[in-house]
Amino acid sequence: MPCHVCETCGTQYADSAAPPARCAICEDERQYVGWAGQRWTTLEELAKRHRLRVDVDAGLLGIGIAPDFAIPQRALLLPTGAGNLLWECVSLVDDAALAALRERGGVDRIVISHPHFYSAMVDWSDALGGVEILLHEADREWVMRPSPRIRWWSGDELALSDDVTLVRCGGHFPGSTALHWKDGPRPGGALFPGDALQVVMDRRHVTFMYSYPNFIPMATADVRAMRDRLARFAFEDVYGYTWGRNIIGGARAAVDASFERHLRAVAA
């Protein structure tokens, strides 16, 4: 039986003879049901209309769907002290992308920031040899295709190595996670925040939203808590959720200024 994929958010569901009646991810107020109503596809059908773009984004190998499908995130390969990490996931798997990953030493673990990017994580794990998928337990209810390869972590921090730490930022989802890579990919380190904080179009600031498509602001208490959790981490770069949405150089100062700008605006 096929595993159906929501065409609006890209989430893959457990195998079933017929598509689910609804997509719980899209019916949540952080997302939305497409204007044409709930629509489904499968990986096989998706591959007929789309391919994977394998490209370099600010020095890191990126993988995304072309033309854009659902939420247009891209995954990144991070060659860290914790092994080769596939940061984030997409809704399509193909041989060219797998070959590109193998040429760079393969993938040791998949790490995903929040439920909107879970996509086809189980198929990716299968294709990569059954690697572990690391998710925060606070978002357990949003896994639509369970797998024994999912490992849940808890708390506000998890050190994967001396140079890689996962930080529970919260706000967008209770378990929204950022990855801090102290030693790379450039001197000064980098933050990979998913949508916990999002690089905006000027690429000089970030923003904080509970729902990005529906423009629901993040609770002020959550923004302050995120600022506190990230305060001890130094980084020169922030890699955003999609191609080119990065702050390269001066990112720590940009994030600090963005926290202040946001809190000043909501207090006005």
Image: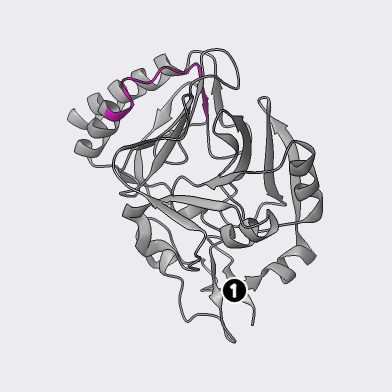
In this view, the residue in front, 16 or 240, is 16
For the N terminus, the image quarter is bottom right
Q: Residue 234 lies in magenta, yes or no?
A: yes
Q: Which residues are magenta?
A: 229-239
Above or below — where is 220 with respect to 154? Answer: above
In this view, the residue in front, 153 or 37, is 153
Instruction: Provide residue 86's location: percent of width, then percent of height.
Output: 60, 42
Q: Residue 248 lies in magenta, yes or no?
A: no
Residue displayed at 51% across by 73% down: 37
Q: State the SS at label 1.
A: strand
Q: Amino acid at mark 1?
A: His
Above or below — where is 142 with respect to 245? Answer: below
Instruction: Provide residue 163's location: percent of width, then percent of height.
Output: 49, 24
The residue that label 1 is drawn on is 4
Q: Residue furthest bottom?
A: 17
Residue displayed at 60% across by 49% down: 72
In this view, the residue in front, 147 or 143, is 147
